[in-house]
Image (tube, helix red, strand yellow):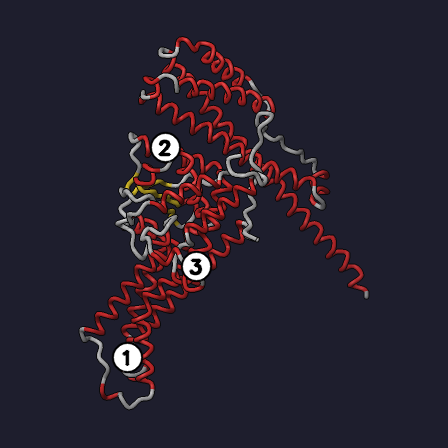
Amino acid sequence: MGILYYLIPLIVIAAAVVWAVAVYNGLVTLKNQVENAWRQIDVQLKRRHDLIPNLVGAVKGAMEFEKETLGRVIDARAKALGATTVAQKGLAENFLTEALGRLFALVENYPDLKSNANVLSLQEELTSTENRIGFARQFYNDIVARFNIRQSVFPSVVIASAFGFKKAEYFQTEPGTHDAPKVDLSLR
Amino acid sequence: MTDIYSEQARNRRTTFFLILGFFVFVVLVGASLDVYQHGSFDALRVPVSTVVAGSFATLNTVIAFYFGSSLVLASLGAAPLEFENLTHKKFHNVATEMAIASGLPMPRLYVLPDPSPNAFATGRNPENACVAVTQGLLDVMNREELQSVVAHEMAHIKYNDILTMTVVSALLGAVSLLSDWAVRSWRYGGIRPRRSVKGRGLHPLALLVIALFVLFSPLVSRIIAMAVSRTREYQADAGAAEFTRNPLALASALEKIKNSSSPLRSAHRGTAHLFISDPLHRKMDDREGIVADVLSTHPPIEKRIERLKRMAYVMTGGQAPGA
């Protein structure tokens, strides 16, 4: 039995090492994907922050009676710019979304604004930006879910805790609303 | 069962076998012509038709792979976007949103100047992908519907369906060309059976084989198109629902496409399977069963709408749509 006596444990150890490396690499890849997805959200948030002054400028003249709504949009934008953590940003951006929603609803009452090409174009840009933020968040949260699940299920939990992987934060939607549950892609 | 990696692998495999099958088919047609002309392989010194067919097949495969999408776009008269046009701008925005939702690079966008609402994607990989829609689609769809149609095309890109479908398109054109050429040469002389070899037993058989090739090559090409297209549409619909989380928008977009009566003018046999809905409005697409499964490029639109509605039902946790 001589050689087998040493060989079998060696093979087992080698297999374990190969597996550990594969799991570790998988976790690192996911971590990078989470970071990339977050950058994508950040890009879109910045895009929205940049568009708001243009919109406010375009509607200000016609909407002098709606100072409060306009003011709320400007305040919400300032708060969103100051937020730093994922959780803070989530909250601040929700306020901004809400304030913008109210502004758009009011624009409906102003026929000359509704037919203004500049306002229409800005509205399209902001609508798209809202959607981009939504979809970037959806994409980000999906990856975070995969990353966090990988860290908590056996056997990959062993590697994750050994190398000190931390769970990623979800980008929250406003309390009370919820994302539609994920579609099961398998066609059964 | 169908995760994205197995789907992409399946598409690569399908494309490989399609190209191989196409190659063998074309070379066999060439060889049959040689045999037909000379009675048997023994009687000829240089198998001219075989060599011609072989080089034709090689050239065609290379062109299909690298220039397939350009050929398809050109043959359909696709034009780049004009950003002064608000509908084009909206299309660009919606595509950006879907690129984010799917995590894919931004595809190149085109518009077909046609009033019939339809859309397709083409290219050999996600980095070289194009999405084209008709002006008619941009005019009749609201934002959510347009978004779901683009999402459907992005799903085709993500699953790598576009490679298979584009290669099929480019090769299909070649097969029809080849069979036309064979039919012509049969009719107008050029190739005539030699009386002197009549005594050989092989001859009637060879004749039959050629007849089959000439008669069936258009049909064979059809069957290839169908084999790659029908289940794909269901899968891309499901993919679109995953990106937008809004299957009902796609259902209502398909409803609008169904109700538009005019066929797409520039579409033809070779490109029909690329579109989100059959641009030729062929009757066969509305049927079900084995024959329809083999002869049609698209599943019945009713069936797709029904599946999407069921998906929406499941997503809302069993509440009625809109509740």
Amino acid on which the number 2 mark rests in the picture: Lys
Can residue B265 be seen here? yes
Look at mark 1 in the image and give the residue it sits on: B36
Q: Are marks 1 and 3 on the same chain?
A: yes
Which chain does tag 2 point to?
B
Q: What residue sits 36% from the left and 41% below the top?
A: B108
| Cα distance in 3D space between marks 2 and 1 | 58 Å
Q: Chain of mark 1?
A: B
Q: Which of these two is toward me, A143 or B221?
A: B221
Badge nearest the viewer, 2 or 1: 2
> Residue lying farthest bottom?
B199
Please state which amino acid type lies under the numbered disc 3: Glu
Q: Residues within 10 Å of mark 2 (few under 14, many from 20)?
A: many
Left or right for A37, reference B43: right
Visible residue check, residue B102: no
Who's the residue at 71% across and 51% down the image? A16
Query: Do the residues bearing badges 1 and 3 touch, measured as CB atoms within 8 Å?
Result: no
Instruction: Please provide percent x and percent y for residue B110.
Output: 32, 41
Q: Earlier in the sequence, mark 3 or mark 2?
A: 2
Q: Write the residue at 78% across / 63% down.
A: A4
